[in-house]
Amino acid sequence: MWYELLPFFGIMFGAAAATQVVHIPFVYVSTGGRIYRRFSNYVDDRKWWERDKQLTGNMYKVAGLENLPEEESK
């Protein structure tokens, strides 16, 4: 009967829900504790964040042209 399918649906629902909960510690560790702050889909994004971190000390504070150091002229 129809009630014989309930365990199957329970297992499938549990597996789908578990993936949503289990991935959080892996994302936390891989991003250094900054979940959902910025996306790193491209390599260039990471380069800009490293530049901002070096210039301002915080990778989430964007450094514009006014924060870049002046080059010494020879």
Image (cartoon, rainbow, N blue to C red):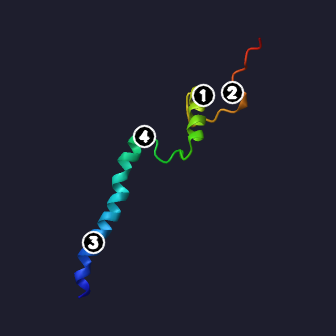
Q: Which residue is mark 3?
A: 10
Disc 4 marks which amino acid? Gly
Q: Earlier in the sequence, mark 4 or mark 1?
A: 4
What separation in Å lies between label 3 and label 4 (alpha carbons)? 32 Å
What separation in Å lies between label 4 and label 2 (alpha carbons)? 27 Å
Circle 3: element type: helix
Q: Which residue is mark 1?
A: 56
Q: Residue furthest top?
A: 74
Q: Earlier in the sequence, mark 3 or mark 4?
A: 3
What separation in Å lies between label 4 and label 1 (alpha carbons)? 20 Å
What separation in Å lies between label 1 and label 2 (alpha carbons)? 8 Å
What separation in Å lies between label 1 and label 3 (alpha carbons)? 50 Å
Name which quarter of the figure residue 33 lies in.
top left
| Image: 56 above or below 41 | above
Q: Quadrant of the C terminus?
A: top right
Circle 3/circle 4 CB separation < 8 Å: no
Disc 3 marks which amino acid? Gly
Disc 1 marks which amino acid? Thr
Circle 1: element type: helix
Does residue 60 appear to the left or right of 66 in the view shown?
left
Q: Earlier in the sequence, mark 4 or mark 2?
A: 4
Q: Earlier in the sequence, mark 3 or mark 2?
A: 3
Callout 3: 10 Å neighbours few (<14), some, many (20+)? Answer: few
Q: Quadrant of the N terminus?
A: bottom left
* Foreground disc of the pair 1, 3: 3
Q: How many marks?
A: 4
Marking on residue 67: 2
